[in-house]
Amino acid sequence: MIKLTLAVLILGASVALAAPHLTVVYEYTAGSDGSRRNLHVFRVEDPRTHQELKSALTQKELELGVSLVAKRKPPSQKNAGQKLYEINLFDLATRRYIGN
């Protein structure tokens, strides 16, 4: 049990240090009025390996990212009813979103 726990801790630490930033992908449905419906975090990943790391961010950090995407220019009305995706980069060193 101790060896397994140690292996998990080492693997977790190496994953956390693998990339200086994470890619956060958001999914939503474009509304006919230009709104983003059902906006949520779809995936959090290491951009180099594409390994999913959703647990690398706190709930507060995930919610902040959703609010930042919600403030962006609204989607075009021609995309109404379509599922769309947007990304943010999250800097692990500063624990902040890049470019927002």
Image (cartoon, rainbow, N blue to C red):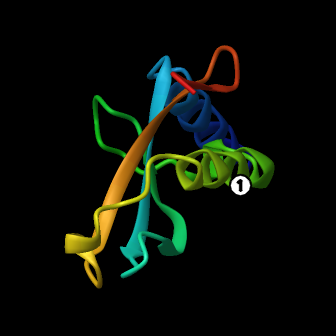
Amino acid carrying mark 1 in the image: Glu
Residue displayed at 28% across by 71% down: 77
Above or below residue 26? Residue 31 is: below
Is residue 79 visible to us here? yes
Tell me the quarter of the picture where residue 50 sits.
top left
Image quadrant holding the N terminus, namely bottom right
**Residue at the left extreme of this rendering:** 78
In the drawing, does residue 42 fall left or right of residue 11? left
Q: What residue is pinned by disc 1?
A: 63
Residue 16 placement (x, y as % from top left) = 57, 29
Is residue 4 visible to us here? no
Q: How many marks?
A: 1
Tell me the quarter of the picture where residue 42 sits.
bottom left
Q: Depth check: 95 or 46 in front?
A: 95
Q: Depth check: 23 or 33 in front?
A: 33
Residue displayed at 52% across by 26% down: 14
Residue 17 placement (x, y as % from top left) = 54, 20
In the drawing, does residue 84 fall left or right of residue 96? left
Residue displayed at 51% across by 47% down: 53
Q: Depth check: 82 or 48 in front?
A: 82
Q: Residues within 10 Å of mark 1 (few under 14, many from 20)?
A: few
Image quadrant holding the C terminus, namely top right
Above or below residue 88? Residue 38 is: below
Residue displayed at 61% across by 28% down: 13
